[in-house]
């Protein structure tokens, strides 16, 4: 390879790196809606308490999410993964 081609390739790589263009996968971001959708798919109905619980998970309070769901009658086998989806 000639010096000019090497230099052009190097400057091209630097330009891409400097511009912030990278080939990366987007980060997975779960939210309260993922939590609620999981509950619906497990045959659980949604009410205000269950909706609020999912928002607690999104805000980082996984334990409160789980406690509210179980208190409101959601089985622990469904509450645990629902809160996981809301908090991820």
Image (cartoon, rainbow, N blue to C red):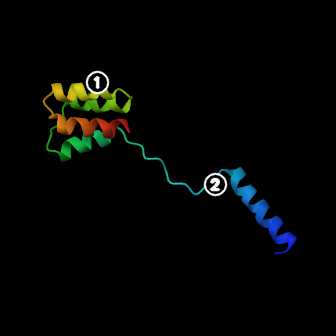
Task: Give the numbered dot on residue 64.
Answer: 1
- Which residue matches tag 2? 21
Q: Residue at x 65, y 50 (%)?
A: 20
Q: What numbered label is drawn on residue 39?
A: none
Q: Along the horizontal axis of the image, is 71 left or right of 25?
A: left
Residue name at image x 18 percent, y 34 percent? 76
Q: Quadrant of residue 56?
A: top left
Q: For residue 32, say whether it is visible.
A: no
Please rate how many residues cluster around mark 1, counting C-alpha atoms within 10 Å: few if below 14, some from 14 to 19, many from 20.
some
Helix, strand or loop at disc 1?
helix
The residue positioned 72% from the left and 59% from the top of the image is 13
* Residue shown at 28% from the left, 24% from the top: 64
Q: Quadrant of residue 80?
A: top left
Q: Position of residue 34 (x, y in %)?
A: 31, 43
Q: Quadrant of the N terminus?
A: bottom right
Mark 2 element type: loop
Q: Using the image, determine if residue 70 lies above or below residue 6.
A: above
């Amino acid at each position: 390879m000639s010096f000019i081609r090497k230099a052009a390739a190097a400057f091209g790589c630097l330009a891409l790196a400097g511009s912030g263009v990278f080939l990366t996968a987007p980060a997975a971001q779960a939210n309260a809606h993922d939590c609620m959708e999981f509950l619906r798919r497990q045959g659980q109905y949604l009410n205000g308490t269950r909706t609020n619980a999912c928002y607690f998970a999104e805000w980082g309070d996984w334990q409160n999410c789980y406690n509210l769901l179980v208190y409101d009658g959601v089985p622990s086998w469904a509450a645990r993964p629902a809160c996981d989806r809301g908090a991820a």
